Amino acid sequence: MTDPILSLKGINKSFGPVHVLRGVDFDAYPGEVTALVGDNGAGKSTLIKCIAGIYTPESGDIFFNNEKVTIHGPRDSTALGIEIVYQDLALCDNLDIVHNMFLGREVKQGFILNEANMEALARQTLDGLSVRTVKSIRQTVASLSGGQRQTVAIARAVLWNSKVVILDEPTAALGVAQTEQVLNLVRRLADKGLAVILISHNLNDVFEVADNISALYLGQMAGQVKKKEVTTSQVIELITTGKSTPFSGVRS
Amino acid sequence: MSVTTEAPVTQGPSLKAAFSDYISRVKAGDIGALPAVLGLVALCAIFAGISEFFFTSRNFANLLTQAAPVIVIAMGLVFVLLLGEIDLSAGYAAGVTGAVLVLLISNHNVPWYLAILAALVVGMLFGLILGTLVARLGIPSFVVTLAAFLAFQGILLLLAGEGGTISISNKYILAVENNNLSVSQSWIFYIGAMGLYVLSGLNRINTRRKAGLKTELIKLWAIKTIGLVVITFVGQLALVAERGDPPRISTKGIPLIVPVILLMLVIGSFVLNRTAFGRHIYAVGGNAEAARRAGINVKKVRTAAFVICSGIASIAGLLFASRANSISPTTGGSSTLLYAVGAAVIGGTSLFGGKGKMRDAILGGLVVAVIDNGMGLLGYGAGIQYLVTGGVLLVSAGVDAFSRKGANAS
């Protein structure tokens, strides 16, 4: 087993009297898709925001490549190579695909935007992800379908040689065919060596694409398991009760 | 990964593909400049058909100087409108900064260039206050600038004082709206401007080709360029023709205001399209939250847009002073601001933010001026002029809203 690229140990986070995360351990491995599942309010978003630097945990350690790191803000996590694709995608409809992919991190020549360079890089990234559904990368995002938007958001996340990509419910609003496209893309990201963290409510998606499943239950890590070693009903048990009938290979 | 998979770049798309591309852009809510251009051509054709005087070179030159202040204010407004905000005070900001300019020159003997600089600084200071109130305190721009509209009107009244008007006789200031380039200068300017336009287009195509990217369809670019050259050439011929009263006064050549506005167009378009700041303005207007998450300082961008808008308004103040030889308490008032907003919207800038260009201000400003000028020539009173202008504005805003609806429905 390779070492995890991102490893959280004993993370605690409270909001006033509410203890949202209680000593959570969480690992993500390069080249693997780790699904983070849990019921509403289990603490998935809070955990993700701790990784993203939006929240700072009260206690607990974060290790990146086996080195202890502190993440104080979104810039820190970005600098480490952690990218998050939020559920609402955060794309500008009025800008084209290239503009969106480079938004806030434009390639410049002096103080002039280097459009040709950005377009070539964007094209290269999309080709690298075998994205063939987008007709022109100079069309505005407004003209794209939901799946294509998700694709653009994901491509933006991997543009910067990122090492960890966190996807928040990427298939929530998509139809069957588009869900399939996005899941394929998720798989390809992992196959390229990235550590992918997939937050999802949909266990079908999770079982289709994930290598590892981590289930949160009321702010505690109920179990980090390998997909091969569990059944859907065992994962549902973990999500709803925090425990499950015995199975092999529980990591924590 | 593999760059070699790129299709051969020389094999561009066909005109038909370009056309269907345009249709899909329209469906996505981007109607471009075509409606404004067609509207302008139609209006000119109608007025030329009815009034013999409309298409004379004297009227054409007059039209340009008449339209200039509104166009300039609209250019500044584009920055604010792109954010989905509004600046109702830009008209009186022009009035106040114009008054500052005139007072400094006429009453305090300040050199004209320093006075222009001072007026610009005052304008930008106004913008800084407005922008800070909107961006930092989160007061809606409509309210902030409405308050500023009243306040600036008050300042202008105080500055103009009891006398009511303050006049100016500085020849450099008066030259801007009243002088023309000589005929030879006009030709040098025209050929130079067209040459630069063609060269920059070729340069763009060449850079993209070198980078191995799909190039704009050369045929389409050529059609557009030739169209522009032909239309401007007709205008050029009209402007270099004699339009004075030859034995006594000879007037010919491009009005000085034309190069001034073109320079502003080039600088403004450059900022909006070629710099990260311009890109961020579009981003904030399109989706402020996405821009914030992308690490863009949204408050700074908002504030900067208001500073630019009021700063440009000070140039309009200069034009008002130059055109009327004076500043009065109503300079920049009455329908000025509304005409400027109307001009930007008629040109294709969206009131919802995120969509618009510098050229919209010019196209829309010309439409507004042509209606004003043409209806005036036909002998219609202000009542009918306002009615028609209002109708045109409503149609353009309707087209904008309708195209957005189409984009969202998909």
Image (cartoon, rainbow, N blue to C red):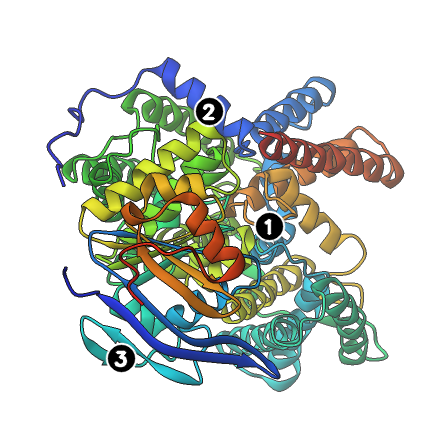
List x then y, in percent, for residue B371: 72, 34
Q: Which mark is residue B353?
A: 1
Q: Mark 3–mark 1 contact, CB under 8 Å?
A: no
Chain of the residue under label 3? A
Left or right of B166 in this view: A64: left
Q: How many marks?
A: 3
The Cα atoms of the two marked residues, 2 and 3, are separated by: 50 Å
* Marks 1 and 2 on same chain: yes
In front here: B36 or A88? A88
Q: Residue at x 64, y 48 (%)?
A: B352
| Above/below status of B291 relative to B64 | below
The Cα atoms of the two marked residues, 1 and 2, are separated by: 21 Å
Q: Residue at x 21, y 35 (%)?
A: B213
List x then y, in percent, for residue A193: 18, 51
In front here: B332 or B245? B332
Q: Please, what secondary structure does the residue beneath circle 3 have?
A: strand
Q: Residue at x 67, y 22 (%)?
A: B48
Query: Which residue is tagged 3?
Result: A69
Chain of the residue under label 1? B
The residue mark sitting in front, 2 or 3, is 3
List x then y, in percent, for residue A218: 53, 67
Q: Residue at x 22, y 38 (%)?
A: B208
The Cα atoms of the two marked residues, 3 and 1, are separated by: 41 Å
- Callout 2 amino acid: Tyr
Q: Which mark is residue B22?
A: 2
- Callout 3 amino acid: Val
Q: Please, what secondary structure does the residue beneath circle 1 have?
A: loop
- Callout 1 amino acid: Gly
| Above/below status of B251 relative to B274 | above
* Marks 2 and 3 on same chain: no
